[in-house]
Amino acid sequence: MAVKALYDYDYPSADRAENFGDDMLVNVMWKGNMTLCSPACFRAPRGMPWADFKAQMIDTWAATDPDYDPAAAGDWHVDDDAFTPTDGMTLAHTGVEHKGLITFRTAT
Amino acid sequence: MAKPKLSMRDRYRLLTRDLDWTPTYVDPRNVYPYTRYEGIKIHDWDAWEDPFRLTIDSYSKYQAEKDKKLYAVIDGFAQGQGHLSLTDARYINSLKLFLQGVTPLEYAAHRHFGYLARHLDGPGARFASLCQSIDELRHCQTEIHTISQYNKYYGGLHDFGKMHDRVWYLSVPKSFFDDGISAGPFEFLTAISFSFEYMLTNLLFVPFMSGASFNGDLATMTFGFSAQSDESRHMTLGLEVLKFILEQDEGNVPIVQDWVDKWFWRGYRLLGLVSAMMDYMLPRKIMSWKEAFELYFEQQMLEGLFPDLEYYGIRPPRHLDQAIAEKDTLSHQIYWILYSFSHAASFNTTVPNTEELDWMSQAYPDTFDRHYRPLWEKARAMQESGNRLFVRGLPTLCQVCQIPLGFSEPGDPATISVRTSHFRQERFNFCSDGCKWIFDREPEKYVQAWLPVHQIYQGNCGGASVPEVLNWYGIEDGVDNGEYLASRDKRAWDEWHAASVVGGR
């Protein structure tokens, strides 16, 4: 259903990919953890190596919870699709889209 | 011989409706251009039954009396250092939320009812809108005057207008009202007059005003009484508007139902902030959010209002089952979000004390001890070890309600709910089925949402670091934000209540 209006109603999205240049927005969720109240949203270069993304962004955020062990993070998914990250893999190569969601779990 | 006295009805007609005329040399559709494009059909504007028969004369006399009483109480309260007899300085955080979140909405309502007072075709409907427009302006002013006295002594209350436009959690109420204002006039009336001011109003006003009364805030309580008669007039108007639209044309029913569905969920999500205020920000509790929802929504609306509306073909709102299922989790999830990000908020939060935790165990027997008490105990332990929990990062926001994605899957408090849609090859994220449904109806509208987190990342909020963004928000670090126990408010409160205090501060 389109917006009803007296004129042609057509405006660009406020967060379209081009507004972020070579970067993208990526959301990350730690499944099974309630200490972190919500997933986090990061701005990162599409070509950022996975090892950097994990160490600089995910680990910093997840360490809000003092029980976080970076080595225990696994079971990685982009939405419902499992993937196995390698250190050199770029963020874009994980398959995550602009404003997409990466999830992980920690072994308990 | 004196002329016979006119009846109230005739007098009112003479004073109001007969001042209207039918345009002859301009097409009425050009005089009132906005009342057709939404698809609502009105055949007879004269069928608008004015529930109040107010005139400007009687209206202003009555309001002036109420103002006089209110300002006398505010003056007395301020001169007698009334703030010192509050239950605790912690209570003022609920006033901060109210002034930053609700007061600017009163002003927005004033503006939009002013617009309706010009643009509705019927004189009765225009006059009712005019009165409500003045009410809303008066509420905005009296709220500012009631709460401004606290600004001298406590943080977080300055710059509330600027904060409303900029700060992340205030984009929740702001975007709610912007959504209404940018809709057509009939959708706005269904959204604000009916859904908000009739269906959900008791869940907003009663908690704040009873909260004031329970916590020694005589000034805000008196504001509440002063606004109450206006609010009950707005409620009556909200129901009248809905019935008027429904009675005019059968084709209006499905359009209105869609709006009731949308605005129930929009309003309910907004009231999530009230749920956190009730359960966590009030040192002396009125009742739990769960009890309030059961009383003011499930009993009063589901058992009272909706059986009446069935006659018009209107059923209870879509996604209501999810709101009912959330009543055991809502306040805990929202306050946990506020607690986790209060370094970037213009109020203070803290871990509830042991009595409060016990109260919540009783109020929420199915969820609290299992899911939320352990969280608060962990937060308390972190705080005691000098590591007060503040999230080191920014949250994912819902594209529609703009609240961080901190709500759980229905019936499963341990799993966060994430919904997505794609529109023109772009992905959008939502907190719930309700918000996703609202987006999918009108994606062209919500793709424009000003999401605070994404705006920070686009460089539109003063800079990339927390201090730069706080500065742009107008939040003074260490005065307005953060942990209550380490706050300036708490320190000052303790000094004022020390055994042998001299003077003010």
Image (spheres, coloured by chain):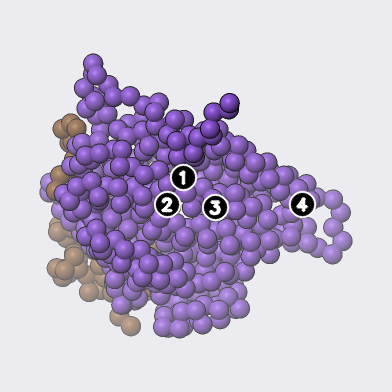
Chain colours: A brown, B purple
B370 sits to left or right of B120:
right
Q: Which of marks 3 and 4 is nearer the N terminus?
A: 4
Q: Name the residue tied to disc 3.
A: B228
Local packing at callout 1 (Cα closer than 10 Å; few below 14, some 14-19, many 20+) is few
Q: Which residue appears at 47% of the width and 49% of the height?
A: B233
Point out which mark residue B236 bears. 2
- Asked whether residue B364 appears in the rendered view, the answer is yes
Q: Which residue appears at 31% of the width and 63% of the height?
A: B308
B459 sits to left or right of B485:
left
Q: What element carries label 4?
A: loop
State which mark lies toward you, 3 or 1: 1
The reply to whether the C-beta atoms of the residues labelled 2 and 3 are less than 8 Å apart is: no
Identified by mark 4, the residue type is: Gln
B15 in relation to B409, above or below: above
Q: What element carries label 2?
A: helix
The reply to whether the C-beta atoms of the residues labelled 2 and 1 are less than 8 Å apart is: yes
Tell me where residue B70 appears, x and y as whole percent: 66, 46
Q: Are marks 3 and 1 on the same chain?
A: yes
